[in-house]
Amino acid sequence: MKLSKISVLIALAFANQAYAADNTYFDNFTPLAASSGVRPATSPILFSSPNFSQTIISNSFNNGISQYAPTVLNNGGDGNAPDMIDADPSGRYIFMPLEQGAGGVLRIDTQDTNYNTRTTVIVTPNTSNSQGFIRGDASRFTPWGSYLTGEENLSNGTVTSGNGQGRMFEVTNPLTATAGTGTFVQRNSVIPLVAHEGMAFDSAKNFYFVDEFASGSVYKFTSANANATNGNDYFAAGTVSALKLNSGAADEGTSLVLGGATNWTTITGVNGRGAADAAGAIGFNRPEDLELLKLANGNEALIFASTAGDNDNNSGNGNSHVYLQNLVTNELSLFADSNTIDLATGLAVGAGLKSADNIAIDANGNVYIIEDRNGSTDNDIWFANDANHDGDLLDAGEGLARWASNGINGSEFSGLYFSKTNPNLAWVNIQHPNGGDDLTVQIAAVPEPETYGMMLMGLGLMGFVARRRKNNQA
């Protein structure tokens, strides 16, 4: 009987260990009550848990990209501004475009212990390699193993010849490219020109993207060859459509809050913005990042931020909308805004939430909302506690919690990305700080001390049982 009880304790201890191994510790924290003040550049982030750590793994003035910094520093004081982050399927390499000035693409080998060799500029700014690429923003690895990015600007909707016109590019050799040898292929034979930021693929390999503009739309590309093994075939032919309310044309700037039944209306032509407007597609108030979210019922949904969305056209009491587009029911709904509960106070988050920009999703399917605000003043990352993962924050105990805050003057968070292979690793960029030295920071989460205690207890009990069995056999 005693042995049976001990066995139960061992099972409980290792059940806890197995649970921890399968889930992230990033959602175990106490919400911050306020934003960070000024912090040292060596420790730029204020976290909501002592069990989160930060390590700077790359910076603009080092690791092979410092040679471009002087050129970019003349453009508004920014450094190279590495932006949105994505990773290859192995999780070893992370990729990001350069947003400011002359654009390019960075690759960081997260397993390279040499700080001075881990970062490689695979698409070099200001060279024929980059084809005049500027203000890179979008970042997405493809199902066939290449890397997509796109230009953030579209010259206010005027599509003309020349550089910087809302183009999308594919790096076809992202893992093998050495410095300046990324094969950079424009993919606009069917994909229209828009101001790129968010990109995502669903499980059926439909491709979604946004037009970051004051009345920008959300788009879907359905390839004629969805199972293609290369970009040439995938982007050669297909249908482009834009998201539209069944009730008719709507613009968030005047309708303020959008929602309801939707459809995807087919558009054609090189000018994605003009075609969407002509088709009566939804005009969101600066849609930015976009991610694919799986709900508890198995439905896939797009979740995206509308940076300038505002409930009452008064940004002083908060602004930004985060929307959820259910890809099964075709319903558009509001996920978070300034009326969402701040879990630190129990009151509406109000002016605490402004300029929501990036979206990230951790290994437990939790959503994080990253603001485009002022470092050392009010630039935060918010954790969205959708406890039952039904795609809203309306149930008891649900709401927003300040998860991290940026303490570097003049900068903003960008590109938070949670590893798909290690649930307790993440990376984020700190863009354009005063002085121009951008940072890429690795974030790690470790278990609470009591979790280690349970693991050690389990190991000790296993040793005791093994010795007892050996003595009994003797």
Image (cartoon, rainbow, N blue to C red):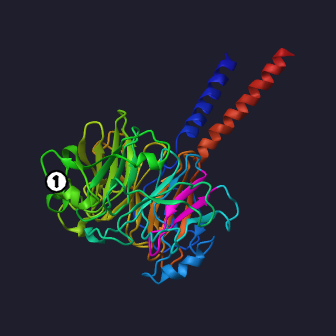
Does the rendering let one see residue 216?
Answer: no
Q: Position of residue 284 (x, y in %)?
A: 24, 58
Residue at the location (84% across, 20% down)? 471
**Disc 1 marks which residue?**
280
Which of the pair 32/278 is nearer the observer?
278
Query: In front here: 301 or 2?
Result: 301
Q: Which residue is depicted at the point 57% across and 45% down?
A: 421
Percent position of residue 424, x then y: 56, 49
User: Which amino acid lies under the numbered mark 1 shown in the image of this protein?
Assistant: Gly
Asked if the magenta segment contains residue 145, the reply would be no
Q: Quadrant of residue 93?
A: bottom right
Which residues are drawn in magenta? 92-110
- To which quarter of the image does residue 10 belong? top right
- Give left or right: position of 331 versus 431: left
Measuring from the top left, give residue 60's x and y in whole percent: 56, 73
Q: Residue at x 38, y 44 (%)?
A: 293
Quadrant, the N terminus: top right
